[in-house]
Amino acid sequence: MRLKIKKTGSFKNSKKYLKLISNASVYDVALRSPITFAPNISFKEGNQIFLKREDLQPIFSFKNRGAYNKILNLTDAQKKRGVIAASAGNHAQGVASACKKLKIKCMIVMPITTPEIKIKDVKRFGAKIIQHGDNVNAALKEALSLAKKNKLSFVHPFDDPLTIAGQGTIGKEILEDDNNFDVVFVPVGGGGILAGVSAWISQNNKKTKIIGVEVEDSACLAEAVKANKRVTLKEVGLFADGVAVSTVGKNNFDVIKECVDEVITVSVDEVCTAVKDIFEDTRVLSEPAGALALAGLKKYSRKVKNKKLIAISSGANVNFQRLNFIVERSEIGENREKILSIKIPEIPGSFLKLSRMFGSSQVTEFNYRKSSLKDAYVLVGVRTKTEKSFETLKLKLKKAGFAFSDFTRNEISNDHLRHMVGGRNSDLGSQNSERIFRGEFPEKPGALLNFLERFGNRWNISLFHYRNLGSAFGKILIGIEGKEKDKAKLIKHLNKSGTIFTEETSNKAYKDFLK
């Protein structure tokens, strides 16, 4: 979604930030982050695309700027009593690193959903950590309560003029680069970085547009723009934890209404694709919130050409356990991987006939479990180069008589079904038995078809699962029906297929869930 903001036409609330940003003290803990040209993304998008590399800060996030500027400006008495903050991670690191630099006692309230990497990084700065609540809002309430009880100075993650001013130094650096960017894309959680960057750029360069970018499941700014007032979301998504905020800040919204041109919302899949894009151009693994601005840039870029666009790459504190999900969903986000449910007749050779439909297209996943004597459904993942090639594939399937459904945007399919296809085979008959084998073959286009052609149609396949794991080999699990007396012939036949197999018929996992 793209939503234009009807700017107020004045800088009533933003004017004071020119002085606050000019006077902001950030460089004791922050570096003037470089601006990197992104050649691969630029080529794909048809625009000159740049990244403002806040992922290279000492805490791998822009949050050290605003936190340090706020804490440095506390009174001596406030510094002596200590500070408290609430954060999902990056602001916590900013506050903790500032307190260590200034030798101030520090307490951080973090949601229980905070990635372990961020908790560890906060601990290394010597801060005391309290985990509370499922999201930043719950942690904020707890931190405010503790601040009042213990007379600590609360350092807000985004809704504070001095914090906003610290983040605003990013906008100052962007203009000092003198690259005459057409549009600057900024991630949005509570709106601190967007308010700071837009306050500076909009008042110093009228030609440059500023666009905020949100994840669809945490779009508190978009809702505020629609209502023309701050609103509180009932729920926020936790995947992009760095921007999982339910209400845009008051100070922030006052500035945004005067200085920001537009807000764009993007899907989790589009964010995952942007993580991949940043990695391919910089070899840095961005966290989801860190790639958010680029995801919005790409959405905007589809309708313009030959423009200079810059996205703030705001953080690289990625939770390593999320990488598998990011890799998988990035293909869907880029509209390269399609998921199809295809109906096939339950007869030998059906697999081979279906596989031939995909030609040179790369099959990423093949899920099947026999469940009746008549028909079966196969869940197939296939990587297509263009939307046109996908339409061609669907036409081929239709002409060959295969009934199918497109599950590419089906959330149940993407999140669950593709990992759950299975069940028990109750139609073996008295003469047949089922044997299970696992194997692997080199990951290249046509490898699956090549295997099925060598395997032939003498034996009926009763179970098949194949998944491209992003490595040099694709792994498969295959169930084969046959008569007991033909066991030796089956093994001999498999050995000639060009694929190394290990029998798993006695594996307890197979017995418990699939036999």
Image: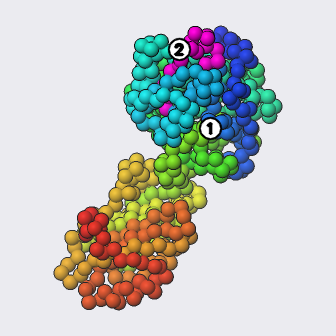
Q: Nearer the viewer, residue 104 or 38?
A: 104
Give coordinates of residue 210: x percent, y percent.
66, 28
Q: How is the image coloured?
A: rainbow
Q: Is residue 404 left or right of residue 226?
A: left
- From what the image shows, is residue 491 above or below residue 119? below
Give coordinates of residue 10: x percent, y percent.
67, 12
Q: Nearer the viewer, residue 6 or 61?
A: 61
Q: Residues within 10 Å of mark 2 (few under 14, many from 20)?
A: some
Name the residue beneath numbered marker 2. Answer: 81
Q: Is residue 111 left or right of residue 507?
A: right
Q: Nearer the viewer, residue 112 or 304?
A: 112
Q: Residue at x 28, y 77 (%)?
A: 434
Image: magenta residue range:
70-88
Give coordinates of residue 148: x percent, y percent.
44, 12
- From what the image shows, is residue 246 above or below residue 405? above
- Residue 458 magenta-highlighted: no
- From what the image shows, is residue 207 above or below residue 443? above
Q: Amino acid at mark 1?
A: Phe
Rendered image quadrant of residue 37:
top right
Residue, far left? 430
Q: Amino acid at mark 2?
A: Arg
Q: Residue at x 56, y 28 (%)?
A: 96
Give coordinates of residue 466: x percent, y percent.
43, 67
- Residue 82 magenta-highlighted: yes
Q: Residues within 10 Å of mark 1 (few under 14, many from 20)?
A: many
Name the residue beneath numbered marker 1. Answer: 60
